[in-house]
Image (spheres, rainbow, N blue to C red):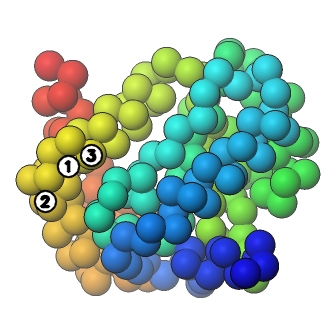
Amino acid sequence: MSHEDEWSCLGTRGGHIEVVPWRPEWPVLFEEEAERIRAACGDALVAVEHIGSTSVHGLASKPILDIMPGLVRTEKGHRTIEPVCGLGYEYCGEHGIPGRFFFDRKVHGASVVHVHMFEFGSPEWRRHVVFRDVLRRDPAVAEEYQRLKLDLAVRYRNDRKAYTDAKTDFINSVVTKALA
């Protein structure tokens, strides 16, 4: 299988929301991509985490990998832009979240990876890791989240922002409860 063929299990085109069954290729692709990002960014990073629904075994997901590199310090993020873009990513600024360095990778015109780079241990970093960890260890919460996403994917098929916004209360509730 060619490297480009590996990405055929991922990707969305035209901004449509689709939620698909979990695929066993996703953690493998994450590991490969995380290693490329680590190598490109060097000592600017402390860690690289697989976040989002593709990181939760068995959970239906939008077919886009979410990768979260942790910066030593936010200021180091600017030094990662050129190396990450050299891996085939487009830099999109903070993309609505202060302190984030956001990158999008497309293969054959379809988004296949989103990189959400934050300072390691920052509130946004912790929020993403806590939510992922709750979904991994609590099947009831994961099932509730999956039902919500499937419903929202139908309701907001052509409105990515509305889809994302409609998940926020659920996510915040889970994170708040986990941190209490």
| Marks 1 & 2, CB-CB < 8 Å contact | yes
Residue situated furthest left in the rendering? 140
Q: Earlier in the sequence, mark 1 or mark 3?
A: 3
Measure how far apart labels 2 and 3 are at the Cα level.
Answer: 13 Å
* Relative horizontal placement of residue 108, taking residue 169 as reference (left or right): right
| Residue 174 location (% of width, % of height) | 19, 39
The residue indicated by pointer 1 is: 170
Camera-side mark, 1 or 3: 3
Looking at the image, residue 25 lies above or below residue 76: below
Frontmost residue, 34 versus 163:
34
Looking at the rendered structure, the kind of residue marked 2 is: Glu
The residue indicated by pointer 2 is: 144
| Residue 112 location (% of width, % of height) | 62, 68
Looking at the rendered structure, the kind of residue marked 3 is: Arg
Measure how far apart labels 1 and 2 are at the Cα level.
Answer: 9 Å
Q: Secondary structure at mark 3?
A: helix
| Residue 50 location (% of width, % of height) | 50, 45
Tell me the tag on residue 136.
3
Frontmost residue, 34 versus 76:
34
Camera-side mark, 1 or 2: 2
Residue 179 location, quadrant: top left
Q: Earlier in the sequence, mark 2 or mark 3?
A: 3
| Marks 1 & 3, CB-CB < 8 Å contact | no
Residue 178 location, quadrant: top left
Frontmost residue, 160 versus 67:
67
Q: Residue at x 65, y 74 (%)?
A: 7
**Mark 2 packing: few (<14 Cα in 10 Å), some, or many (20+)?**
few
